[in-house]
């Protein structure tokens, strides 16, 4: 089981709400989380076996945010 992690520009729970439809479509509903306590605002996708990191970066870009694979 592969886990993907990304440094993001998501700053608060309101922004998480904005990206939710995009990330759910790409990573699957309830298959991701953003650690707002981490200074890098890390997005973690624990079950990412069939997912390319570029797909996640593109999904966040469609929502207006940036992501960089860790």
Image (cartoon, rainbow, N blue to C red):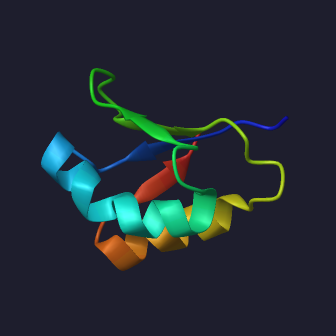
Q: Residue furthest top?
A: 37
**24 w.r.t. 25: above or below:** above
Q: Quadrant of the N terminus?
A: top right
**66 w.r.t. 61: above or below:** above
Q: Horizontal placement of 40 versus 24: left or right?
A: left
Please identify the quarter of the rendering in which residue 51 is found: bottom right
Please identify the quarter of the rendering in which residue 7 is found: top left
* Residue 2 visible somewhere in the drawing: yes
Q: Horizontal placement of 48 versus 64: left or right?
A: right
| Residue that appears at 27% across and 48% down | 10
Near-viewer residue (46 or 8): 46
Near-viewer residue (27 or 56): 27
The x and y percentages for residue 50 are 82, 58
| Residue that appears at 48% across and 61% down | 23
The x and y percentages for residue 47 are 73, 41
Near-viewer residue (8 or 20): 20
* Residue 12 visible somewhere in the drawing: no
| Residue that appears at 27% across and 21% down | 37
**45 w.r.t. 68: above or below:** above
Q: Quadrant of the C terminus?
A: top right
Q: Horizontal placement of 6 versus 61: left or right?
A: right
Q: How many marks?
A: 0
The x and y percentages for residue 16 are 27, 50
């Amino acid at each position: 089981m592969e886990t993907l992690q990304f440094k993001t520009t998501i700053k608060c729970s309101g922004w998480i709400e904005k990206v939710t439809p995009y990330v759910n479509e790409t990573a699957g509903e309830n298959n991701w989380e953003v650690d707002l306590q981490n200074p890098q605002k890390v997005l973690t996708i624990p079950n990412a076996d069939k997912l390319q990191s570029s797909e996640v970066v593109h999904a966040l870009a469609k929502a207006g945010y940036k992501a960089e694979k860790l």
